[in-house]
Amino acid sequence: MVWVKVCGISKRTDLDAAAEAGADAVGLVLAAGTPRCITVDQATRLAGQSPVPGILVTVDESPEDLMELVERTGARGVQPHGEHQADAAKEAARNGLMVLRPVRVGKDRFSLDHVPGSQIPILDTADTRRHGGTGRTFDHDALPPIHRRWVLAGGMGPHNVAEAIQKLQPWGVDASSHLESELGVKDPARIHAFVREAKGQ
C-alpha cells in the first residue's frame, strides 16, 4: 500500500485529521518565511502528540543544527532543503532517521544518482523562488522508470493522486497546498479524501 505524508501540519486538528484518515507521516515545516512555518515549540508539541512519525521540513540547516532540532522536537524523520542538504541528509541517515531527500524536477536532466540508498528521494516541482509547496505538478511523462523507493510530491491532491499513482507507481506520495481551504489552513475533509484516494480505500 502507498505510503502517505500530509505536509504543513500546524494545528492539533490537522494532526488528528491526518492520523484518523490513515496517513503514515506528517510534515512539520520549520522554514522561516513560508506560509506553513511553525515554531520549534509547536513542532515539539505536535510531534509529541502525533501517533504517526513527524518529519521536519527545513531549509539551510547545518547537519549539527538539524540534529539539534530533531532532538528538541522528537521528530522521527527529516526533509532538508537548501544549503547543506547533502551533508544534513547524510548525518540524519547515519543517526537512523527517515530521510526524504528533495529532488526538484524541471527542464534539466533528471537523475537520482546523487541520492544514496539510505535516503528516499521526494520529487517536487522545480521553482526558482521556493523550495517546495508550489501546488504545481511537473511533467510526469518526462520521468524515466524509477527502480527504488521514492515519493511523489508537487501539486498532489484528492483530484489527481489516484491517477498519478496508477501511472507512476511511486512508493509514497506527499501533499500540502491542495489539502487547504486557504493558504496555510488545512481542510480535514480534503485530508481524508487525499489519503482515501492515495490508498485506494
Image (tube, grey):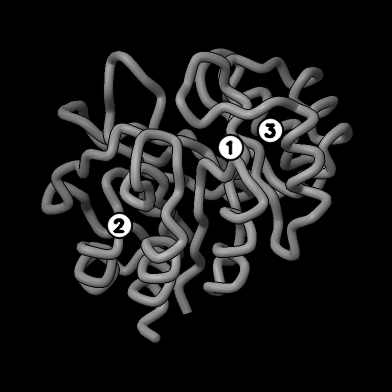
**Residue 90 badge:** 3
- In the rendered image, residue 109, in percent from the top left (x then y), is placed at 22, 31
How far is mark 2 from mark 3, CA to CA? 30 Å
Q: Is residue 120 above or below residue 160?
A: above
Q: Which residue is more in the foreground, 54 or 99?
A: 54
Q: Which residue is mark 1?
A: 79
In the rendered structure, which disc, 2 or 3, sits on the residue that comes first in sequence? Answer: 3
In the image, residue 134 lies at what x, y percent?
30, 32
Dot 1: element: strand
Within 10 Å of disc 2 (Cα), the crowding (few <14, some 14-19, many 20+) is: many
- The vertical placement of 47 against 196, above or below, is above
In the image, is 167 to the left or to the right of 11? left
Specify whether 108 is left or right of 7. left
- Identify residue type, mark 3: Lys
Distance from label 1 to label 2 (Cα)? 20 Å
Q: Is residue 133 above or below residue 60?
A: below
Give percent across and percent down for residue 5.
Answer: 52, 57
How far is mark 1 from mark 3, CA to CA? Answer: 11 Å
Q: Which mark is residue 33?
A: none
Residue at (69%, 49%) from the top-left corner?
Answer: 54
Q: Is residue 148 visible?
A: no
Q: In the rendered image, which quarter is residue 145 located in?
A: bottom left
Label 3's element?
A: helix
Which of the two labelled residues, at mark 1 and mark 2, occupies the earlier sequence position? 1
Residue depicted at x 33% and y 74%: 197
- Identify the residue under disc 2: 157
Find out whether the residues at labels 1 and 3 contact each other: C-beta distance under 8 Å: no
Eye-nearest disc, 2 or 3: 2
Mark 2: which amino acid? Gly
6 or 179: nearer the viewer: 179
Vertical relation: 115 (above or below) 83: below
